[in-house]
């Protein structure tokens, strides 16, 4: 998942693991985020850097221009990381392991908090610096480790179904599908008049987005990746139904063959070029697909709905990005003040209006003016509030790699879904220790 989505990608991304034993929501002292931990010292002022995924919207540059104009002695310089969340994480970890001061503020996917906090790579933040009583609770929890705040919630995210309302209406389909079967039937009707168009795609390349899409499919079939006790539970009929939706979709042509190479941006371009009827995507696509500058062939021709599932609406993975301060960065006082600025409700409203990214403030979802411009906001709020969190665990990297490896093997036909899930169960048990 692209962390910036998510997670989002950048990132992304993501998945529905709930391996939170001993992590968020728990007390205790693990040497990194326990009850004795205290926020860092934030008194240095001066120039800083911000390492984040590539800014395709232009919003970050405009926000930096505003800050830098008002703070000539505390300039913020943007460092753009790779587009994919996995590559962003790798670069951030390499920087932290060398204790480099090259990055002051780092954008972190919501599933990296435990790993970065436990390893001492980011500072604990003072909770009273942020109006968390006004923020969505799921977004706040992604920024905590052992009940301590290690990042500021900046963008949250929930998956949505983008669809060609014009093509559905022309084919006599009056509402968005709520189930996978309804979606397939709608595609057949549309394709009867438009034989060259693809039915459905998500993020199926072998990266964090696949963890997200696999987990959503499992959840949307009534399964879980791990149970409430933190035990892996993917070798089940429900998980098989979810994985089969993706694998059989590719083998049958419901999902175009090219979709096996899609990350967020590849899929977005395909949808904007009119090559897809349905697309699972983060809400950032809304503003770009509605552009009237000629970059989108579907502007004004699409709508957004909740993700479909096996027998009813599906269940999204929770995505988003948080902002943390590197343990090794300089001028952390400026860094904290800038994070307070960029994550303020006023600035998040600007960001929503410019990019359609999902804000963390509850009131923005309920604003009538914003709802008129972004009619999907109520369903996005519900998607976020009902989303399943990915694991806030120290070994998240091993966990997501295992999911990607086995899910991709099933999607590409190298393994049956039964064998892939059996192997994944074994790998997750070894990683989690249960």
Image (tube, grey):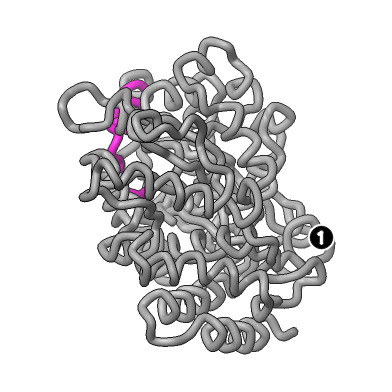
Residue 139 lies in quadrant: top right
Is residue 90 rendered to the left or right of residue 400? left
Location of residue 34 in the rendering, given as x and y in whole percent from the top left corner: 77, 62
Q: Position of residue 30 (x, y in %)?
A: 75, 70
Which of the image's four quarters has the N terminus?
Answer: bottom left
Furthest residue toward left: 294
Residue pointed to by mark 1: 26
Q: Residue shown at 50%/42% (left/top)?
A: 160
243 vs 123: above or below: below
Measuring from the top left, give residue 374's x and y in whole percent: 47, 22
Q: Which residues are magenta?
A: 52-66
**Left or right of 148: which side holds 273?**
left
For this rendering, which residue is in front, 233 or 276?
276
- Residue 40 appearing in the image: no
Q: Residue at x 61, y 41 (%)?
A: 383
x 48%, y 80%: residue: 406
Q: Residues within 10 Å of mark 1 (few under 14, many from 20)?
A: some
What count of labels does the image hold? 1
Residue at the top extreme, as displayed: 369
- Does 63 lie within the magenta span? yes
Residue plotted at (40% across, 53% down): 2
């Amino acid at each position: 998942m692209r962390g910036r989505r998510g997670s989002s990608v950048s990132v992304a991304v993501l998945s529905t693991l709930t391996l939170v034993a001993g992590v968020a929501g728990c007390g205790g002292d693990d040497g990194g985020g326990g009850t004795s931990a205290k926020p860092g010292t934030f008194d240095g002022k001066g120039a800083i850097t911000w390492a984040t995924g590539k800014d395709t919207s232009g919003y970050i540059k405009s926000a930096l221009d505003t800050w830098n104009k008002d703070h000539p002695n505390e300039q913020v310089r943007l460092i753009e990381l790779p587009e994919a969340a996995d590559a962003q994480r790798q670069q951030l970890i390499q920087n932290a392991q060398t204790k480099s001061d090259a990055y002051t503020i780092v954008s972190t996917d919501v599933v990296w908090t435990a790993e970065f906090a436990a390893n001492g790579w980011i500072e604990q933040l003072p909770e009273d610096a942020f109006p968390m009583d006004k923020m969505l609770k799921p977004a706040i929890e992604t920024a905590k480790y052992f009940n301590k705040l290690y990042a500021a919630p900046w963008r949250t995210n929930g998956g949505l179904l983008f669809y060609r309302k014009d093509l559905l209406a022309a084919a006599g389909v009056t509402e968005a599908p709520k189930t996978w079967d309804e979606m397939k039937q709608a595609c057949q009707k549309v394709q009867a008049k438009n034989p060259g168009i693809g039915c459905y795609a998500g993020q199926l390349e072998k990266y964090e987005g696949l963890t997200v899409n696999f987990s959503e499919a499992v959840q949307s079939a009534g399964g879980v990746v791990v149970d409430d006790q933190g035990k892996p539970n993917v070798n089940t009929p429900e998980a098989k139904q979810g994985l089969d939706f993706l694998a059989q979709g590719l083998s049958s042509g419901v999902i175009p063959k090219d979709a096996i190479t899609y990350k967020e941006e590849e899929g977005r371009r395909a949808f904007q070029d009119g090559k897809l009827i349905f697309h699972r995507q983060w809400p950032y696509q809304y503003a770009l697909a509605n552009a009237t500058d000629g970059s989108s062939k579907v502007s004004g021709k699409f709508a957004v709905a909740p993700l479909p599932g096996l027998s009813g609406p599906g269940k999204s993975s929770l995505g988003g990005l948080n902002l943390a301060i590197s343990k090794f960065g300089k001028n952390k006082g400026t860094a904290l003040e800038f994070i307070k600025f960029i994550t303020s409700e006023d600035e998040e409203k600007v960001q929503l209006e410019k990019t359609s990214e999902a804000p963390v403030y509850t009131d923005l979802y309920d604003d009538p003016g914003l709802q008129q411009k972004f009619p999907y906001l109520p369903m996005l709020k519900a998607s976020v509030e009902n989303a399943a969190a990915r694991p806030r665990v120290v070994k998240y990297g091993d966990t997501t790699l295992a999911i990607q490896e086995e899910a991709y093997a099933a999607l590409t036909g190298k393994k049956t879904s039964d064998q892939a899930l059996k192997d994944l169960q074994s790998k997750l048990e070894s990683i989690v220790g249960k």
